[in-house]
Amino acid sequence: MAVRPIRIDVSVTGDVKLQRELDKLEGKILKKYIRFAMRRAFKPVLRESKRRAAAITNPKNATELMQKVSKGMKMRSVRRKRGVIGLNIFVPGRQQLGLPAWSETGPGRFFTPAHVELGTKKLAAQNYLRGPLEDMRESTIRRFRVHLWRQIRKHLKPDSVS
């Protein structure tokens, strides 16, 4: 079976020079650089999400739980699929938070981190995940570009082997 080269199409709107350099890179190297730049660009968003989650005091019974959510939040790559590169921010699950297992009735039917993020009839939404992403959108894109350029420049540097 013949090995097929990886072909990745990446479009960076507004930066023609960066787009030209990206077109020159091979598939595997390009994916590696994009993953690196994305992870670096989104770290401040994760930090801000953790800070906002820890600062939530309403509803009162969720304060301690949201402290646990803040400490347990992690950034992970999306599942590998052809042509998809991305990141997810995960909150800890029921077991890690010490919540009862899901049930249709009783205390297990609620997942407080989701109710705090999305809101309910009685509780306004407190966006600790979506808020930082929306607020930091431009700076995240700028950081992504900077880190991607650094990786490309490192790749284009001539080897100093004598």
Image (spheres, rainbow, N blue to C red):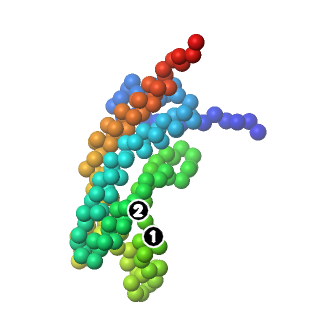
- Few, some or many C-alpha atoms within 10 Å of disc 2 (few <14, some 14-19, many ≥20)? some
Instruction: Where is residue 43? Give x, y as percent.
Output: 37, 47
Residue extending farthest to the right is: 1
From what the image shows, is residue 138 above or below residue 156?
A: below
Q: Is residue 147 left or right of residue 131?
A: right
Residue 155 seen in the figure: yes
Badge 2 amino acid: Gly
Q: Earlier in the sequence, mark 1 or mark 2?
A: 2
Disc 1 designates what residue? Answer: 96
The residue that appears at 53% across and 16% down in the rendered structure is 160
Q: With respect to residue 42, does 129 lie above or below?
A: below
Q: Secondary structure at mark 1?
A: helix
Quadrant in which residue 111 is drawn: bottom left
Q: Quadrant of the N terminus?
A: top right
The one of 64 and 28 positioned closer to us in this rendering = 64
84 to 118, vertically: above or below: above
Residue at 37% across, 61% down: 71
At x 48%, y 36%, the residue is 33
Name the disc covering residue 78, or none.
none
Query: Measured along the vertical axis of the image, is residue 129 above or below residue 60?
Result: above
* Residue 72 - label: 2
Residue 76 location (% of width, % of height)? 47, 53
Please indicate whether residue 95 sits to the left or right of residue 13 in the image: right
Numbered disc total: 2
The answer to whether the residue labelled 1 contacts the one labelled 2, judged by CB atoms less than 8 Å apart, is yes
**Does residue 115 appear in this view?**
no
